[in-house]
Image (cartoon, rainbow, N blue to C red):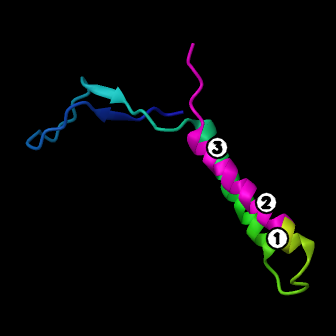
Amino acid sequence: MAQKYTSAAKTAGASSAKNTDNLQPVQFIFEKSNYILLAVSVAVVALGFVLMSGTTDIYSSTKIVVAPLVVLAGFGLGFYAILKKPAPKA
């Protein structure tokens, strides 16, 4: 996986030549597992809305019980993905 770098100090009047001496790796807020969980939660919420859609049998248990629970589970998984702390590096 490619590592992204950012300049340690940016000045307004700097020359156009890139200085590679003071480059530091970019620190992302989330880890890869957080982004994967967030993508899965979006898919679960979308699945819940698909289960809720349709015009036939508006009072079916799938539309009024199962689909809202699937949507809430997706939102819960999204909150967990955001609040999950990174694993300690040994």
Which span of residues is magenta-colored?
66-90
Q: Mark 3 is on which residue type?
A: Tyr
Residue 52, horizontal then vertical, whole percent: 79, 74
Q: Mark 1 is on which residue type?
A: Leu
User: Along the line of sight, which residue is nearer the eye, 38 or 18?
Assistant: 38
| Placement of the N terminus among the 4 image quadrants | top right
- Real-space Cα separation, disc 3 to disc 2, in angstroms: 15 Å
Classified by dominant secondary structure, the portion drawn in magenta counts as helix
Rendered image quadrant of residue 84 = top right
- Indicate the secondary structure of the residue bearing disc 3: helix
Q: CB atoms at circles 2 and 1 under 8 Å apart?
A: yes
Which residue, given by chain and number where applicable, does mark 1 sit on?
51
Q: CB atoms at circles 1 and 3 under 8 Å apart?
A: no
- Is 62 placed left or right of 48 in the picture? right
Which residue, given by chain and number where applicable, does mark 3 sit on?
80
Please report whichever mark, 2 or 1, sits nearer to the chain's N-terminal start: 1
Q: Residue at x 55, y 35 (%)?
A: 31
Badge 1: few (under 14), some or many (20 or more) residues near its Cα, within 10 Å?
some
Q: Is residue 70 magenta?
A: yes
- Real-space Cα separation, disc 2 to disc 1, in angstroms: 9 Å
Image mark for residue 70: 2
Furthest-top residue in this view = 90
